Image (cartoon, rainbow, N blue to C red):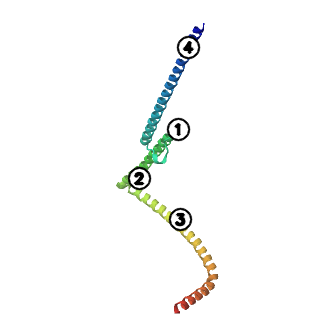
Amino acid sequence: IKQSRKAESERRRKELERSKKEAEEERRELQRQKREADQLAALEEEKRQFELKQRLIQEGVDLSQHKVVGMSMEDQQKLIEETRKKIVQESIESDKKIEATAKRLDTIVRALREKEIPKLKVLYKEKLKQDEADHHKTWQDFIEKSKVEHESAIKAKHEYSRMQSSRDDFEKSLLGRWTEAYEK
């Protein structure tokens, strides 16, 4: 009976050691898998950041003004959307400018034809009146500004005139001291 107990305890001990070894191996395997998963996640994040930078560059975003690393996907999408909207808005504004220029050019070309010369004269007179009105307004603004500056200059002159006699006395005493020091 002792031997069977010894054999049983030896078997249990070996089984316990074997289960400990298996648990240790399983723990090591899990750690290795976790390290590999972390490395893979880091590589995927680096790849995602690189692709994001490439997309932003293609969209015309100035990367020096934006911190791309660590941006959430939501922020990245917002940045890309804002850039797209900005590009579309610039395109629309550019198209409007081109259209306005084309209209003016068309008007001038048509006006150059003999039949259209009276229209050109009317447009010229209107432009002349507008320029004259703008000049008059600018001149009036200048006059008003000059009056305000003149009034403030008169106030300053009045304040300084009260100090003039003190200034003259100070100047005379200072010149006297300098002359006296020079003569010595």
Question: Residue tagged by mark 2?
Answer: 104
Say above or below: 158 vs 14: below
For the residue pair 89 and 167, the one nearer the viewer reads as 167
Give the residue displayed 61% in from the left and 76% down from the top. 156
Q: From the image, state whether disc 4 or disc 2 is nearer to you.
A: 4
SS of the residue under disc 3:
helix
Instruction: Find the distance from the CA under tag 2 to the CA under tag 3.
Output: 26 Å
Q: Are marks 3 and 1 in contact (CB under 8 Å)?
A: no
Q: Are marks 2 and 3 in contact (CB under 8 Å)?
A: no
Q: From the image, state whether disc 3 or disc 1 is nearer to you.
A: 1
Q: Amino acid at mark 4?
A: Glu
Residue 137, disc:
3
Q: Are marks 1 and 4 in contact (CB under 8 Å)?
A: no
Instruction: Find the distance from the CA under tag 4 to the CA under tag 3.
Output: 111 Å
Give the residue displayed 38% in from the left and 57% down from the top. 117
Q: Are marks 4 and 3 in contact (CB under 8 Å)?
A: no
Q: From the image, state whether disc 1 or disc 4 is nearer to you.
A: 4
Question: Residue tagged by mark 4?
Answer: 10
For the residue pair 20 and 111, the one nearer the viewer reads as 20
The first of marks 4 and 2 along the sequence is: 4
Q: Position of residue 176 (x, y in %)?
A: 57, 90
Q: Amino acid at mark 1?
A: Ser
Give the residue displayed 55% in from the left and 14% down from the top. 10
The first of marks 3 and 1 along the sequence is: 1
Q: Position of residue 149 (x, y in %)?
A: 58, 72
SS of the residue under disc 1:
loop
Question: Residue tagged by mark 1?
Answer: 72
SS of the residue under disc 2:
helix
Q: From the image, state whether disc 1 or disc 2 is nearer to you.
A: 1
Q: Amino acid at mark 2?
A: Arg
